[in-house]
Image (cartoon, helix red, strand yellow):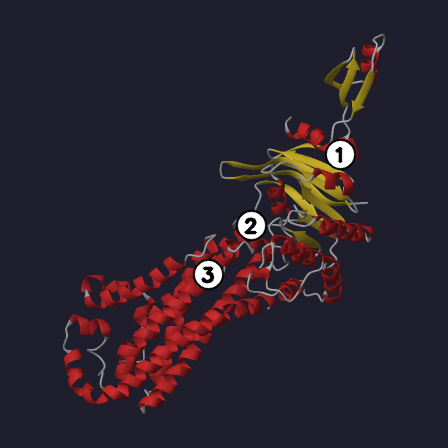
Amino acid sequence: MGNVIEIQNLTKTYGKSRGVNDISLTVEQGDIFGFLGPNGAGKSTTIRSMLGMIHYQAGSIELLGLDAKTHQKDILRQVGYMPSEAMFYPSMKVKDVIKFAADARKMNCDKEAEYLCKKLEVNIDKRISELSLGNRKKVSIVCAMQHKPKLFIFDEPTSGLDPLMQEVFFDLILEYNKQGATCFLSSHVLSEVKRYCKNATIIREGKIIATDSVENLSHSDVRHIKLWRNGKLEEFVHQGDINELLQQLQGTKIDDLLIEQPSLDEVFMHYYEQ
Amino acid sequence: MTLWKHEMKMNLKSLLIWSICVGASCFGCLLLFKGLESTMDEMAGAYADMGSFSVALGLDKVAINTVEGFYATEVALIFAIGGAMFAAMCGAGILAKEEEGHTSEFLSTLPMGRINIVGAKYAAFAVLVFLFQVICIGWILVGFAGAGDFPPAKEFMMYHGLQFVMQLEIGSVCFLISACCKKRQTGAALGLALLLYMVDLMCRILPDIKNLKYITPFYYSNASDIFTDPNPEPVMIGIGMAVTLACAVISGIVYSKRDLAA
């Protein structure tokens, strides 16, 4: 399988402010790839560089085998993008926005749009100005998916969506993924990355600090230990080989012992705070 | 074409409001002519003899007691300022509104290309200015019918043709401002239109600054001058058209090179 996203040594600065610094990452076709990082880490800068909204100073970006600088229109034809702020023209009706997005692609997406609107419970006769953030997000999902793109790029897609709609949204991603689409999911909701993504990268202060499978990233050799000895509770953290801990405890009389894995949030917080 | 149609729809309300307000004002003013006709003969002499004021408003060139003179000195003033303000406002908002309204992310990630976005928006702006002209001419012709007299066709067509060129020029400068800014600069655009009008008045009165006539498009599109001699200086019109073209091209270059706000 080829790479759908290939970013090499991307650097973008805003005057004296940092954007992203020398980042490289690749995403394989068919992957659901998580892009994790705290606020201001450079996630949106990376995505906006990929889509040609901002011009980067160094490095290269290839999406679907095409150079992002020279083949922007060809790339955008095959990409479905959902921005973190789902903003549309307030005076327009939902159905007109959806139609406008399809017409701009010179495609008739009526059938798929109808299917998506039904699944997401979108009221197409309402005006954008009457919609809440969550409902605008749903319109944004329809606009990003109706043309069945090869690559999805989502920037904080679930903020504003209720849990039920989040479930529907991820069902749709899995459905398109089964048909061969690749998904690049920028998020700071760790649970959804853990649940749906196969691989992920963690970005902090404009630099990539880890890239691996989500399973490996969320694995840690840190354990929370609760030990009851002589009627007293002792709590401590053990990091390293678990056999060393067992050796330490050998020969001592223990009333009870609880060994816990750190939560996913704690593992990722460890990356963020490095 | 999709974006052009979209822009036309989005600006239809503003076009109707402006063209009805300006057109109806011109229409109403022309109807006044009939009522004032009997007193106009006395006024014409007085108006033509007010020194610099007469020069500035062209009252020394055309007679206010004729329908074309009344049109050129009174009605055309409303039309010129109203038209310039509409063009300025339209040009200043058409690109910058995307970033101001946070819709640039939606628009620029559709497969259109930034040059095509600028092209479609500029085309929409030019057609809106043209339609403004057409609607207002309709009002004005009805006004002339009400006044019972029509101006000479050649001068009338020449005047409105040059008004269109003038409106395009001012609007194009504002379009360029719009391509450079993340927020609509409506105040600056309206200020620019009024400033250029003031420059026209002043350079007609003060010989020391007469060369400013090459800067302000109100000079070559002045109704009194055109109704006196419908062969305006081609140099000034050429400068106006060159400014319009340059602004459109530079807008495309600037907009495609700069980072867009979300």
What chain does mark 1 sit on?
Answer: A
What chain does mark 3 sit on?
Answer: B
Q: Position of residue A98 (x, y in %)?
A: 66, 63
Label 2 in the same subunit as label 1: no
Label 1 in the same subunit as label 3: no
Q: Return the mark for residue A212.
A: 1
Label 3 sits on a secondary structure element that is helix
Label 2 sits on a secondary structure element that is loop
Along the line of sight, the residue nearer the viewer: A91 or A112? A91
Q: Which residue is mark 2?
A: B262
Amino acid at the residue labelled 2: Ala
Along the line of sight, the residue nearer the viewer: A197 or B96? A197
Q: Return the mark for residue A140.
A: none
Amino acid at the residue labelled 1: Asp
**Up-down relation of residue B145 to residue B232 (above or below):** below
Q: Which residue is mark 3?
A: B93
What chain does mark 2 sit on?
Answer: B
Q: Is residue B37 visible?
A: yes
Q: Are marks 1 and 3 in contact (CB under 8 Å)?
A: no
- In the figure, is residue B42 to the left or right of A99? left
Mark pair 2, 1: CA separation: 30 Å
- In the figure, is residue A39 to the left or right of B230? right
Farthest residue toward the right?
A251
